[in-house]
Image (cartoon, grey):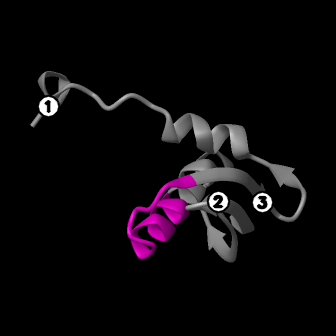
Amino acid sequence: MNFNLEVQLRIDGTGVAQTGAFNARKAEEIPEVAYQFIQHIKRETGYRETIIEKVIINHDHDITDMVLEIENRPIPKMDDVWW
């Protein structure tokens, strides 16, 4: 499934918008793809303070809440990780 993605971020107080064409095997994977795109932007900008303001797919579907949910997941304890 192909989709267009637009992310609007605030990096160290400066508004930044990035767009791109992406694909996912199924619609449920789109928020994760968007989250990975934002992580890529964070790496490129040196992990400065980044606030996700809006995430939009195909110019009209707002998935900001789904992406924020992924970002705010708690980090699992090392005891819970199976090696």
Above or below, 9 relative to 27:
below
Residue under circle 3? Answer: 57
Q: CA distance from mark 2 to mark 1?
A: 36 Å
The count of marks equals: 3
If you read the primary sequence from the N terminus, does the residue marked by circle 2 or circle 1 appear first? 2
Q: CA distance from mark 2 to mark 3?
A: 18 Å
Amino acid type for the residue under numbered disc 3 = Ile
The x and y percentages for residue 11 are 58, 63
Please, what secondary structure does the residue beneath circle 3 have?
strand
The x and y percentages for residue 68 are 60, 40
Q: Is residue 26 magenta?
A: no
Q: Is residue 44 left or right of residue 22?
A: left
If you read the primary sequence from the N terminus, does the residue marked by circle 2 or circle 3 appear first? 2
Amino acid type for the residue under numbered disc 1 = Trp
Please, what secondary structure does the residue beneath circle 1 have?
loop
Residue under circle 2? Answer: 10
The x and y percentages for residue 16 are 68, 70
Q: CA distance from mark 3 to mark 1?
A: 34 Å
Disc 2 + disc 1, Cβ < 8 Å: no
Residue furthest to the front in view is 13
Q: Which residues are magenta?
A: 36-50
Residue under circle 1? Answer: 82
Residue plotted at (58% across, 34% down):
69
